[in-house]
Amino acid sequence: MSDAITLTGSYKTAETRGTTRSLRTLVSIRRYASPIVLVCLWQIACSSGLLSTRLVASPVQIAVTGWTLVCDGTLPFNLGVSLLRAGSGLGLAISLGVALALVSGLSRIGEDIVDAPLQILRTLPALALVPLYILWFGIGETPKILLVALGATFPIYLNLHKGIRSIDPKLVEMASTLGLSRWQTIRDVFLPGALPDFLTGLRYAVGVSWLMLVVAEQVNAESGIGHMMMDAQDFLRTDIILVGLLVYGVLGLMSDQIVRLLESTLLAWRPDGRKGRTA
Amino acid sequence: MTHIQSDVHPGTAVIVERLTRRFNNGPPVLDELDLAIAPGEFVALLGHSGSGKSTLLRTLAGLDPVTDGAVTRPRDVSVVFQEHRLLPWKRVWKNVVLGQEDKAIRQRAEAVLEEVGLSHRSNAWPLTLSGGEAQRAALARALVREPAFLMLDEPFAALDALTRLKMQQLVADLWKKHGCAVLLVTHDVDEALLLADRAVVLERGRIRVDVPITIPRPRRHADPGFEGLRSLLLDALGVHAA
Ligand SMILES: Nc1ncnc2c1ncn2[C@@H]1O[C@H](COP(=O)(O)OP(=O)(O)O)[C@@H](O)[C@H]1O
Ligand SMILES: [Mg+2]
């Protein structure tokens, strides 16, 4: 018996690289194989009448309905409305969260004033405020955007605040021996140092935005993906509901990818192993 | 209460008079300490861990207040700490000229990186540097400001022995070239003997030993002329040479 471990590697030439690439394609196909099989089974169950379309539409039906909704403009219109709401809410949340985090992260007095109320507020489930929001802001766009903003502000604030507070004091001290002004220190030390935490917060905030939007649009709306789905419920159109779900899924996935891309470009200074793994 | 007096002339000496420093009304860490460093002089500050070396250096750097006593020093000073303290999110050359905002910064950064032998890494991210390279970058950042007084707080303590020898040589060369006054905090008696004009031993907040090192330069490690001084300093530090 030997305890030795041999680690070997070989420098890849152009030819061997070709074969590894086809191998990698094979592996990625294998990853998608099981979802594809599941969808096929689903289709078979629907076609054979095993699954009632009243409960769930078949994949083919969903595809057809999706295409029809795209062509008659229903889906693009509602998607546009939803995106605008989510975007405005998130934009508001970022401005507010960043402003609050800067105030409380960069000054002791600011922290005393800002942090305590926010820490209390964040324990409230934001969704429980829906009735109050409708009472306050009616049924227009305002309550929906504000609901998204409310939910998304907290992850931004909490993460950025933590990021600013956990900056290495030695770096701040260095900045002062180099004669940097307060503003230069904020710009060159605090903000870039807190960026990884901010991006983590942003990722959570984006997720929360979609969640808040779903609720806002299903409770009380005349347009948007959520409304489209609630409307379909009245007519037992499970196909439309599933199209809506699919759209939400794709939106969530895409926004997550965008934040990841932001991370890998903005945090290029991190060693490879830590890139894009802030969460 | 007295304050640090800054002087614009590069020829200003560093003068510490009856400097006393306590933390939280405890026993004095610096106890009526007197020290003078002439312009261009290289002084090594030795002492046990906790003897107040860093406290003295931080006071000279303006990081700690002068609460009791007086300190005079040139206006332009730089500090290099044991940790490089480079901003990980700025490329090496940008770290070197951090806080400077004129048109010639890139040129100046490249020139000083060349001096410390790091021009090939000027575009690198700090987290990809080795310990020795990072300390070179920290030295470059200190020198680019053309300080009249350079403070080094155990700058090589975290480096491996071989790298440390190279860095000591580098510091000797840079000092010869720039001619600034240097205060080097170290716990390495040989390092002090190799580099300094004068060795000072700090003990319980006061200077106990203050000896000139007159061995001609360039000096070499383990020069036989070091023996007498080495045992003197080791004695002062409470370590008895064999
Ligand atoms: N910020 C501080 N608060 C309280 N005590 C301190 C502080 N900084 C240093 N000291 C104390 O002062 C003494 C000298 O510390 P220091 O100057 O760092 O020693 P050295 O650099 O010689 O090892 C130590 O006993 C240390 O505990
Ligand atoms: Mg120290």
Image (spheres, rainbow, N blue to C red):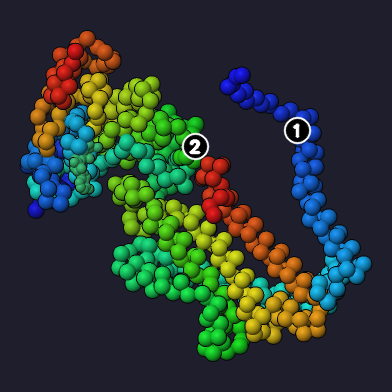
The answer as to whether callout 1 falls within 8 Å of ligand 2 is no
Q: Which residue is mark 2?
A: B128
Q: Quadrant of residue A36?
A: bottom right
Q: Residue at x 56, y 50 (%)?
A: A277
Q: Residue at x 20, y 37 (%)?
A: B50
State whether residue B127 appears in this view.
yes
The amino acid marked with disc number 1 is: Arg
Disc 1: host chain: A
Q: Residue at x 79, y 52 (%)?
A: A34
Give neighbour class at mark 1: few <14, some 14-19, many 20+ (Cα, 10 Å).
few
State whether residue B195 appears in this view.
no
The amino acid marked with disc number 2 is: Thr
Q: Residue A97: x, y in percent?
A: 47, 68
Query: For the residues tagged 1 and 2, is the chain the same?
Result: no
Disc 2: host chain: B
Q: Which residue is mark 1?
A: A17
**Quadrant of the frame with the C terminus of chain A:** bottom right
Q: Quadrant of ligand 1?
A: top left
In this view, B187 is above or below A249 = above
**Quadrant of the frame with the N terminus of chain A:** top right
Residue that extends furthest to the top in the rendered view of this protein: B224
